[in-house]
Image (tube, grey):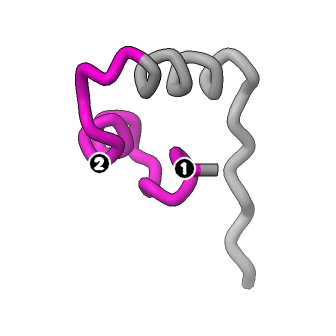
Amino acid sequence: MSRKRTVYSAEFKSKLVLEVLKNEKTLQEIASANNITPNYDSR
């Protein structure tokens, strides 16, 4: 069986973007803290 894709809410995505824009953590740190792959951060 195929794996179901995870759907992220707009609120979650905006929270990630704000974290990235603050430049307090690296993309890798933000991704690992939120259990996502870093590829999603850079899109």
Nearer-the-camera pick, 41 or 32: 41
Q: Is residue 31 magenta?
A: yes
| Range covered by the magenta-colored residues | 22-42
Alpha-carbon span between mark 1 and mark 2: 10 Å
Residue 37, located in which quarter of the rendered image? Answer: bottom left
Please name the residue that numbered disc 2 is placed on: 28
From the image, state whether disc 1 or disc 2 is nearer to you. Answer: 1
Residue 28: x %, y % from top left: 29, 48
Residue 8, located in which quarter of the rendered image? Answer: top right
Q: Residue furthest bottom?
A: 1
Dot 2: within a 10 Å radius of its alpha carbon, few (fewer than 14), some, or many (20 or more) residues?
some
Q: Amino acid at mark 1?
A: Ser
Q: Is residue 3 above or below residue 4?
A: below
Dot 2 lies on which element?
helix
Q: Earlier in the sequence, mark 1 or mark 2?
A: 2
Residue 10: x %, y % from top left: 75, 22
Q: Is residue 27 left or right of residue 41?
A: left
Residue 1: x %, y % from top left: 73, 84
Q: Amino acid at mark 2?
A: Gln
Which residue is drawn at the image coordinates 55% and 25% (left, top)? 17
Which residue is drawn at the image coordinates 54% and 50% (left, top)? 42
Nearer-the-camera pick, 4 or 15: 15
Which residue is drawn at the image coordinates 73% and 27% (left, top)? 9
Q: Is residue 32 magenta?
A: yes
Which residue is drawn at the image coordinates 68% and 50% (left, top)? 6
Residue 35: x %, y % from top left: 39, 45
Please name the residue that numbered disc 1 is placed on: 42
In contact (CB < 8 Å): disc 1 and disc 2: no
Q: Is residue 7 left or right of residue 25?
A: right
